[in-house]
């Protein structure tokens, strides 16, 4: 547990990292998995076709104390994984995270061009 990021929910007085409410993953692991989904090394061609017809190769979600975002930008071949360690009942932190995420994407796309 020493290597797990602390998680906080506004109004809850304790660190949530030891609660059984979420998943434990390293950003590198999420990135490796998402890249494999996109580069075709995870599924064969037929499976890839089926999967792409149903899902986008990205993820965002939250559990109390944690938010995660993982996106692949095919035009720049950039994969972005972000973890945030604070949530709130009115989702203000979620909205702030979305603003930060879009700024990161803009910066990386500008650097790539």
Image (cartoon, rainbow, N blue to C red):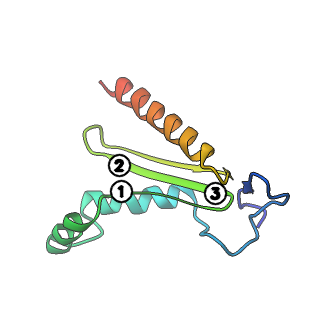
Q: Check the image and name the residue furthest to the right.
A: 13
Which-is-in-front pick, marks 1 and 3? 3
Q: Residues within 10 Å of mark 1 (few under 14, many from 20)?
A: some
Q: Check the image and name the residue furthest to the front.
A: 90
Q: Is residue 56 left or right of residue 18?
A: left
Q: Which label belongs to residue 66?
A: 3
User: Which circle's residue, 2 or 3, is located before the other in the chain?
Assistant: 3
Q: Nearer the viewer, residue 96 or 52?
A: 96
Which residue is label 1 attached to? 35
Callouts 2 and 1 close, C-beta under 8 Å: yes
Residues at marks 1 and 3, CA–CA distance in whole angstroms: 22 Å
User: Which circle's residue, 1 or 3, is located before the other in the chain?
Assistant: 1
Residues at marks 2 and 3, CA–CA distance in whole angstroms: 21 Å
Q: Is residue 59 left or right of residue 56?
A: right
Query: Can you say which quadrant of the picture contains the C terminus?
Result: top left
Callouts 1 and 3 close, C-beta under 8 Å: no
Q: Residue 22: x, y in percent? A: 62, 69
Q: Which label belongs to residue 72?
A: 2
Q: Residue 90: x, y in percent? A: 63, 50
Q: Residue 14: x, y in percent? A: 84, 60
Q: Residues within 10 Å of mark 3 (few under 14, many from 20)?
A: many
Residue at the spot x=50%, y=35% of the render?
A: 99
Q: Residue 68: x, y in percent? A: 54, 54
């Amino acid at each position: 547990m020493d290597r797990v990021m602390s998680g906080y929910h506004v109004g809850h007085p304790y660190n949530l990292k030891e609660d059984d409410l979420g998943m434990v993953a390293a950003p590198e692991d999420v990135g490796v998995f998402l890249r494999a989904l996109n580069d075709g090394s995870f599924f064969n061609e037929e499976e890839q076709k089926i999967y792409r017809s149903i899902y986008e190769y990205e993820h965002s979600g939250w559990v109390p104390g944690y938010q995660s975002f993982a996106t692949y930008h095919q035009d720049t071949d950039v994969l972005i994984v972000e973890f945030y360690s604070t949530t709130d009942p009115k989702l203000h932190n979620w909205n702030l995270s979305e603003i930060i995420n879009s700024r990161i994407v803009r910066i990386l796309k500008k650097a790539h061009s």
